[in-house]
Image (tube, rainbow, N blue to C red):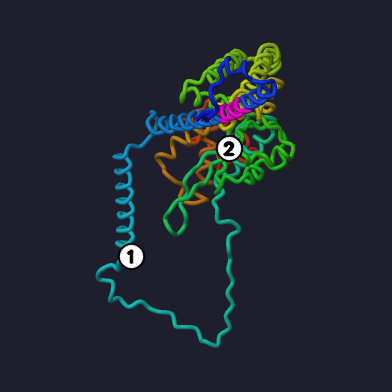
Amino acid sequence: MLVASSSPVITTDYLDTLEPQQMRAALLSLMGELAERDGVIARQGQEVVFKQALIDKLTHENALLKRMKFAAQSERFSTERKSLLDESLDEDLQAVADEIEHATQPVAGCQDKQVPKRALLPANLPRREIRHEPESTTCACGCQMVDALRVELLQHRVLHADETPVAMLKPGNGKTHRAYLWAYATGAFEMTKAVVYDFCESRAGEHARTFLGDWKGSLVCDDFSGYKALLAAGVTEVGCLAHARRKFFDLQAANQSQIAQIALEQMARIYEIEREVKELSAEQRLAVRRERAKPLLDALHEWMTLQRRKVPDGSATAKALDYSLKRWAALIRFADDGQLPVDNNWIENQIRPIAIGRNNWLFAGSLRAGQRAAAVMSLIQSARMSGHDPWAYIDDVLRRLPTQPNSRIAELLPHHWQRKSRAA
């Protein structure tokens, strides 16, 4: 609030009676009061701006939470379905326990039968224990094909990468913890269509480094920190414009932001160009991007930079603008390479079946179980990407695999596969 002044009201008649020295003192007093009031007004203005930014931020977060809670979502389990599912799981577990108990009960009538027993060896007889452990306890069925698929995938210059959480059962206590299924796919514009899933216990970036090894190329990914070590080792980052667009979409849906609306309209023009060049060659696509998309991107960057100076730090609008501006070099890399996609939606489409399916199979029973499932799903989804019927592909490959020479295993990969005709 403004501080009321205790000075008397100065009239023109009063000023006429003042001496020059008194006049000067009165003016200095008034100037001091005005400066004090200006300081109070400035502080109040800053407080209003801060509180308005806080209100906008909380309004945005509240709107997002409402959308997450009340908006329609596919494959969502209702409370009743979850309850039924839990009951059915308990019934299945109890049924298995009953079968085990029944199977371990001694057969009636055989209890009194005397079974000959081997006499114990003398205690003074020397004993030496020799264990013959297998080299590996993991079944290698199908692993050769997935390994070959990974080798061919790493021969491409452009790859997509993403990851999704999957529940994994912890040994011993029956509880689950969050594991991750990593996905790596050939570029959206590559002739070879393939994806390899890698089931890992965590989201640590070392898993991506282990899978990609010495590969150097253009990696289309989100801004997840796990990929940063790869970028430092020579991998080129290609940003996802869809992630940047999503920030403005959430902002516009939450509070009808005019800045978000303008950003969405400009990005829509870029996506319209991408739809037009989708079927063109890399050279033709690059020429159109440089002629039409590059000027739009330059104008969008200039406009975002100008708007960022106008909005307060910490606001939802500032965060949406910062996400794009800080990653701008990676976001526009597609404009200088016709083989690069505009976003990472290609790999997200390959992860979608996993995200839908996990609502039904709930969790992986162990790390090995998750790895086996990832291997099978890699072949099935790659077959679907190549336009094959997954059932026909798996059926034919399983019939041919036992007699297929290892040197020709690549012939059975989804993007090379040709169904072998059977004699009637």
**Disc on res. 104:** 1
Amino acid identity at mark 2: Val
For numbered disc 1, what is the local secondary structure? helix
Residue 236 location (% of width, % of height): 71, 32
What segment is highlighted magenta in the picture? 32-43
Q: Nearer the viewer, residue 134 or 93?
A: 93
Of mark 2 and mark 1, the one earlier in the sequence is: 1
Above or below, comparing residue 60 to residue 376 in the picture: above
Q: Kindly identify the amino acid type of the residue bearing the numbered disc 1.
A: Thr
Left or right side of 54 for 360: left
Circles 2 and 1, Cβ within 8 Å, touching? The answer is no
- SS for dot 2: strand
Residue holding disc 2: 196
Can the viewer see residue 13 in this picture?
A: yes
Is residue 316 something one can see in this rendering? Answer: no
Q: How many marks?
A: 2
